[in-house]
Amino acid sequence: MIVVNTETIPGYQIVELKGMVQGNTVRAKHAGRDIAASFKNLVGGELKGYTELLTESRREAVERMMAQARQLGANAILNVRFSTSAITAGAAELYAYGTAAIVSKIE
């Protein structure tokens, strides 16, 4: 599966558009991460627990988006975007979406 955030893929032609595909995940903060983040806020620096949480969330959302594209028979997803939103205090959604397509290599 080719996944890009552009409208085209150099060296490939779009044969058929299959439609929008999406994947999302909702994650809650971990109490241990919150305590560590509170201490880190005092001295500054990267909040590694939250960085890991977002990395895992992005991976899961993209995997779900790719699974939906496969069900449509696509071999690529174009124009991929990410969005986040707060669901409740302590929980957030990460949403990935793009356009599923069938592409072929230009000879």
Image: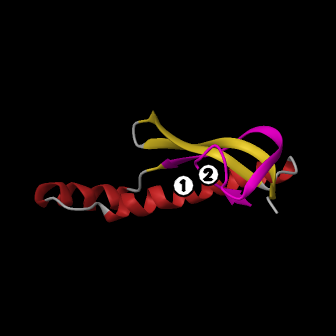
Q: Residue furthest front?
A: 107
Residue type, label 1: Arg
Q: Would residue 35 appear left or right of 81 to someone viewing this image?
A: left
Percent of width and height locating residue 32: 34, 61
- Point 29% across, 60% down: residue: 47
Q: Which residue is mark 2?
A: 61
Residue type, label 2: Ala
Q: Residue furthest left?
A: 43
Count of marks, rendered view: 2
What crowding class fits label 1: few (fewer than 14 Cα within 10 Å), some (14-19), or many (20 or more)?
A: many
Q: Would residue 59 appear left or right of 34 to someone viewing this image?
A: right
Does the CB distance between marks 1 and 2 fall below 8 Å? Answer: yes
Rendered image quadrant of residue 100: top right
Q: Which residue is mark 1?
A: 58
Percent of width and height locating residue 68: 78, 48
Percent of width and height locating residue 91: 46, 43
Q: Would residue 89 appear left or right of 41 to someone viewing this image?
A: right
- Point 41% across, 56% down: residue: 30
Give the camera-side residue of 53 and 73. 73
Under tag 1, what secondary structure? helix
| Label 1, label 2: how far apart the Cα atoms are | 5 Å
Q: Compared to 93, does 52 lie above or below?
A: below
Disc number at residue 92? none
**Residues rendered magenta in the picture:** 1-27
Residue 16 in magenta? yes
Residue 79 in magenta? no
